[in-house]
Image: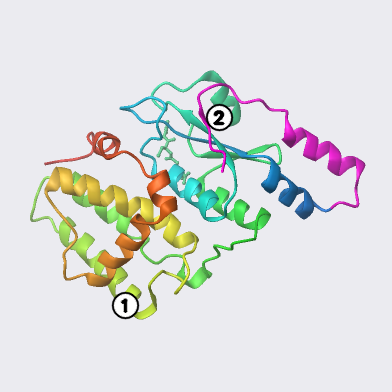
């Protein structure tokens, strides 16, 4: 897979434009065929956060990692544009006026927000499907805010640690009954959303609170390890020092 990191302005023409005009002139060719043509020939342009510590490396945005994981698991080629979020280039505000990463170019249109991007990729590239049934999509969804609550907490007796343990226990129970992944035997979109958040939780709480996931939560522990050890995850994960630096303004030790 050709993955290139680049901080240069994006060319708005190239194959996106070609695909569009081709579809105008040959109306019998379906959108689906154009999508699969692109999947095999043209990498998708995706803007993600750059490392704060090492320019040219991928940064510490869990939403960016989610999108990269989706592309990796679907075996879609991509061309990664690294955005220095502390000093965004002018052209990036043309791509996304809100100035947030991740953003992806699908058929010539820039799409923001990892939820919308994951959904759009599923619709346009249904092969190697990552669909999570709606009734399972919220599994683990309380963990990220509980982690941030505990990280920001100044008072060890304020119940934030217990609130996080409660959320992780729910995950542990769920995986025990339904695992190894949220949708059973195969990884799906909900795991790709939750995995990067668990990664941030583990590094930030380990560093700032000397905390680690209780060993008694064996199912949550094995779930985390199976996600963190995937090739796609290792390839797209943030540097540890970036995760630590990224949470420094929120953390209370
Ligand atoms: N809800 C958005 C959140 C995206 C987001 O918060 N991105 C952060 C980096 S992790 C960002 O771009 N921050 C830069 C800024 O707000 O200026 C998503 O799921 O994509």
- Ligand 1 has an atom within 8 Å of the beta carbon of the residue at disc 1: no
Say which element carries label 2.
Answer: loop
Nearer the camera: disc 2 or disc 1: 1
Q: Residue 176 carries which label?
A: 1
Magenta stretch holds residue 14: yes
The relative height of residue 9 versus residue 103 in the rendered view (above or below) is above
Say left or right for 235 vs 107. Answer: left
Q: Name the residue under label 2.
A: 97
The residue that appears at 42% across and 61% down in the rendered structure is 191
Say which element carries label 1.
Answer: helix
Q: How crowded is mark 1: few (under 14 residues within 10 Å), some or many (20 or more)?
A: some
Q: Nearer the viewer, residue 70 or 173?
A: 70
Residues in magenta? 1-29
Dot 2 or dot 1: first in sequence order is 2
Q: How crowded is mark 2: few (under 14 residues within 10 Å), some or many (20 or more)?
A: few
- Residue 170 percent across, percent down from the top left: 29, 71
Say left or right for 87 vs 30. Answer: left
The residue that appears at 16% across and 64% down in the rendered structure is 214
Magenta stretch holds residue 91: no
Q: Residue 49 carries which label?
A: none
The relative height of residue 18 versus residue 11 in the rendered view (above or below) is below
The residue that appears at 29% across and 47% down in the rendered structure is 200
The quarter of the picture where the N terminus appears is: top right
- Residue 48 percent across, percent down from the top left: 47, 36
Write down which quadrant ligand 1 falls in: top left
The quarter of the picture where the C terminus appears is: top left
The residue that appears at 37% across and 51% down in the rendered structure is 196
Say left or right for 55 vs 165. Answer: right
**Residue 226, quarter of picture:** bottom left
């Amino acid at each position: 897979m050709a993955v290139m990191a680049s901080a240069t302005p994006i060319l708005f023409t190239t194959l996106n434009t070609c695909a569009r005009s081709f579809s105008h002139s040959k109306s019998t060719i379906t959108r689906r065929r154009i999508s699969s043509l692109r999947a095999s020939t043209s990498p998708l342009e995706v803007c993600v956060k750059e490392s704060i510590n090492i320019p040219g490396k991928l940064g510490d945005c869990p939403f960016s990692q989610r999108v990269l994981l989706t592309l990796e698991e679907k075996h879609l080629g991509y061309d990664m544009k690294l955005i220095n979020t502390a000093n965004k280039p002018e052209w990036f505000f043309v791509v996304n006026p809100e100035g947030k990463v991740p953003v992806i170019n699908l058929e010539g249109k820039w799409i923001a927000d990892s939820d919308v991007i994951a959904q759009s990729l599923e619709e346009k590239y249904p092969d190697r499907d990552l669909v999570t049934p709606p009734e399972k999509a919220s599994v683990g969804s309380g963990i990220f805010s509980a982690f941030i609550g505990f990280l920001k907490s100044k008072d060890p007796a304020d119940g934030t640690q217990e609130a996080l343990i409660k959320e992780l226990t729910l995950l542990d129970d769920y995986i025990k009954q339904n695992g190894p992944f949220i949708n059973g035997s195969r990884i799906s979109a909900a795991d790709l959303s939750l995995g990067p958040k668990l990664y941030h939780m583990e590094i930030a709480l380990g560093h700032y609170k000397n905390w680690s996931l209780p060993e008694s939560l064996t199912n949550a522990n094995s779930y985390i390890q199976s996600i963190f050890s995937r090739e796609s995850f290792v390839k797209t994960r943030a540097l540890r020092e970036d995760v630590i630096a990224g949470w420094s303004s929120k953390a209370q030790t």
